[in-house]
Image (cartoon, grey):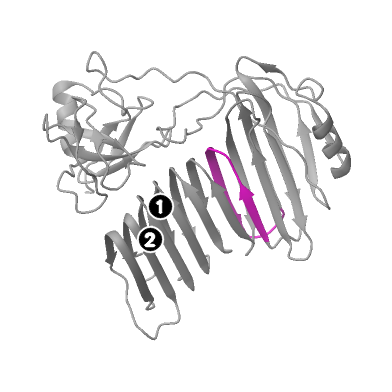
Amino acid sequence: MGQELTQVLCPECGTLGESDPEASRWQCTKCGSGYFLRRCSACARVAYVYGLQGFHLPWACTWCGQFNRGFSQNQDPAAASAAELAAEVARYGPPGSAAGPGASGQANLAPAADRGSPAARDPGGGLTSAAVTGSPGTAPPLPAVAAPPPPGRRIGLPIAMVVACAAVAAVLLAAGGPKAMGMAAGPGGTTRAVLVTASRVSAVDLHGVPGQLTIVGTGSGQVMLTGELHGTGGAPAIETRLERATGVLVVSIRCASAGPCTENLRLVVPGTTGAGVWQPGGRILVTGLAGPLRITASSVDISAGGLRSAVLAAVITNGHLSAAFTAPPRRVSITLASAQATLRLSAGVAYHVTQQVTSGYLRVGIPQAASATRTVTARIDSGELELLPS
């Protein structure tokens, strides 16, 4: 018989999930919030530590609120198991929210206030786009830059879609405000829907805003970017440009000057088309990508699985990266600043690993050879990196 799983309560959305009893890290399958489990030095109970906790930075206990010195993803003497957490929750009841203890010592399971959502400003040069009208309302969970992503509720929006050529769409989006474009702006902000497609693209460079981005690799078809943008101080703008000489589709999202904005986007990438992402906060999910992957991000939680990319280059500041390859990459470059990363690489080949560690931890569990043609370059400044066999 298999090992019995332990039930873990998500302090963010109140969902009861399952975990390996010995695991010291857990992620909610409903809202996506991730946590490390650490034992508080003040009250000795097992606390939730948010998944984007910075390396060697103090963290607040979710039971007593006292700050604990330092944090490490690996080899942390304060690491505790899901089974230990479950035992204490059963005995004492749930702790307060992940940010600190509640006034009553109980978990705050009420959903966060509703948020609005997204839109598209349009492509040029051979791209197909659609401007979609919407109305303010709730949206899927969108992570904040420096706090766990609060859950939201998804509702249907009445949508009227107008498909136009790229030049016409660009004029409409540039000339009209939210009302002129059929988008309501109210206390909940402005919501826009995004729909951008392109053919014969070698790579997509996406300059995003805080929120969630999902990248899905497919066998064939078009590049397609869909989802929503939400601005609290005005309609966010999305601009696209297809560089015909290189075949690179450049997508840039800007918040209105009057207030912040968030994204909830899905990017479908066919074949060996590459993806480059610049994101200042939130969550990035990648599955099945075969083309090169380049990520520059801060305050993010990145999960990448089923990778067949020959090239991975990631620069992470104050965040977490987990990546698993199903085919051995040719070149990997990881730069961490107050961040943690775990890479799982094929153990069937050897790698030439070079490192520059100012402060932090590097664990190499993959085959190495100085003459290997496959390379892994690690640059770490107050961070942790594990290179493990898949």
Q: Name the residue under label 2.
A: 343
- Which amino acid does the dot numbered 1 rest on? Leu
Residue at image coords 87%, 43%? 167
Determine if the magenta segment contains residue 211.
yes
Residue 389 image offset from top left, x and y in percent: 33, 67
- Which amino acid does the dot numbered 2 rest on? Leu
Q: Nearer the viewer, residue 140 or 260?
A: 260
Residue 313 image offset from top left, x and y in percent: 49, 62
Numbered disc 2: secondary structure: strand
Residue 248 image offset from top left, x and y in percent: 70, 59
Magenta-drawn segment: 203-222
Q: Is residue 308 above or below residue 10?
A: below
Residue 19 seen in this snapshot: yes
Residue 198 seen in this snapshot: no
**Quadrant housing the C terminus:** bottom left
Residue 288 image offset from top left, x and y in percent: 53, 57
Residue at image coords 46%, 46%? 298
Q: In this view, does 228 lie to the left or right of 25?
A: right
Mark toward the start of the polypeptide (2 vs 1): 1
Residue at image coords 72%, 18%? 184
Measure how far apart labels 2 and 1 are at the Cα level: 8 Å
Q: Main secondary structure of the magenta part?
A: strand
Which of the numbered marks, if any, corresponds to residue 321?
1
